[in-house]
Image (cartoon, grey):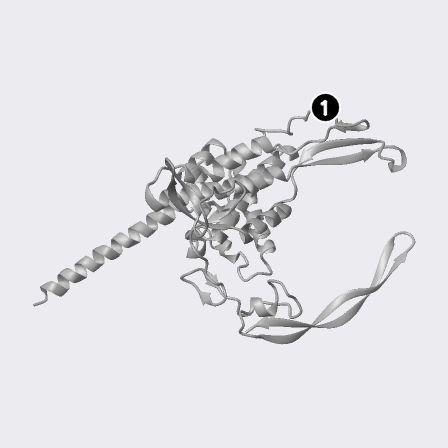
Amino acid sequence: MHLVPTVRGAMLTRLAVAALFVLTMHAATCIAIRWLAIADSDSPWNHTAQCRSVPGLLGAQMRFCRDALELMPVFAASARSTRRTCEAAFSNMRWNCSSVRQAPSFAPDLERGTRESAFVHALSAAASSYAVARACAAGDLHSCSCAPIPGSAPSPGFRWGGCGDNLRFGLLKGGLFADAALHVRRKGNSRATKLMNLHNNLVGRTMLLQSVETKCKCHGISGSCSVRTCWKGTSELATIAATLKMRYMSASKVVRRRVGSRKQFVPKDMDLRPIRKEELIYMAGSPDYCSHNAEMGSHGTHGRHCNRTSLGSDSCILMCCGRGYNPYTEELLERCHCKYHWCCYVTCKKCRRTVERYVCK
């Protein structure tokens, strides 16, 4: 009498195990930003054995770690800067990048190929190359030094000097590390996800490369700047993140279809056109981030601060998702009535000021 339920139960158990295995493999092979977990590592990075014990590194990245141990403190620093920069860039939006702190075990909002995932991939790829390029210029690495001096000076009173960011070395090593987990060949959706992440990583490095500018220091009598010593350097990571945030806002949802003789990404809801190399792409929709939903990776906006007079993403209307908000007052202690004394110090009084704040219901 109990044979059918027993068989049915066994089948359901096997299906559940199989589904769990597929999900585990998907997470293990498709999440190339798990390495951001090294932001919390206190490893001294002085022995190759540590490459296997630090959470977040996948097989190919472990091998890279063993071959280039000197670079690992730089990548750990870039993981921390990725987290700080992402949170600063999205501090006034419903998604505030707090998902990144869950590395290496991300929630679905960063696992499923969302536009948030696209941004984090691009920013972390840019940050890893940026950190290596800056470390070379700072003399922190034995394997590299300053960038090569550019060609002839463009004008009189101008000379190349200083120590430029070694972006060529940074792009090489940062790219090898950030992309290491994405070059394993897989079929089906896993392969499409890898190609999407590789594209978004490349967008991040492209924005880094386009941020290079000429920086100069003046020399001359009384600050006349009769001679300028200049070098090539990248913009700050926050500036690059701001550019990527604009790409995030205009990111394209794509599908992978056969166009002509090969498969490629095309916009899902538009005419067939090639995806631009500077365009962030994603394949899965995002949570609304209004309500708490741990299964989807949404922390919700309950308790978040909002701006009652703003018309932007930090406004109480948008941030609170129509639920309303609660006001409260806060007393601040500030320096005031400051006075300069010759020579050379400043004295200030302390004043109390009451301000009104607003938090989402």
| Left or right: 229 as drawn, with respect to 82 | right
Residue 74, quarter of picture: top right
> In this rendering, is residue 180 above or below 326?
above
> In this rendering, is residue 186 above or below 16?
above
Percent position of residue 127, x then y = 56, 43
The residue indicated by pointer 1 is 152
Percent position of residue 147, x then y = 64, 29
> In this rendering, is residue 151 above or below 332?
above
Could you say which is closer to the camera, residue 110 or residue 322? 322
> In this rendering, is residue 222 above or below 330?
above
Q: Residue furthest right?
A: 342
| Left or right: 125 as drawn, with respect to 18 | right
Point 43% across, 43% down: residue? 265
Point 59% across, 59% down: residue? 91
The answer to whether one can see residue 55 in this image is no
Could you say which is closer to the camera, residue 204 or residue 65? 204
How many numbered badges does the structure rendering display?
Answer: 1
Q: Secondary structure at mark 1?
A: loop
| Left or right: 279 as drawn, with respect to 330 | left
Could you say which is closer to the camera, residue 261 or residue 138? 261
Dot 1, how many residues are within 10 Å of its Cα: few (below 14), some (14-19), or many (20+)? few
| Left or right: 138 as drawn, with respect to 24 | right
> Quarter of the image containing the C terminus?
bottom right
Percent position of residue 161, x then y = 73, 28
> Quarter of the image containing the N terminus?
bottom left
Q: Amino acid at mark 1?
A: Ser
Percent position of residue 201, x then y = 50, 42
The answer to whether one can see residue 108 in this image is yes
Point 49% across, 44% down: residue? 200
Q: Residue furthest left?
A: 1
Q: Residue furthest front?
A: 271
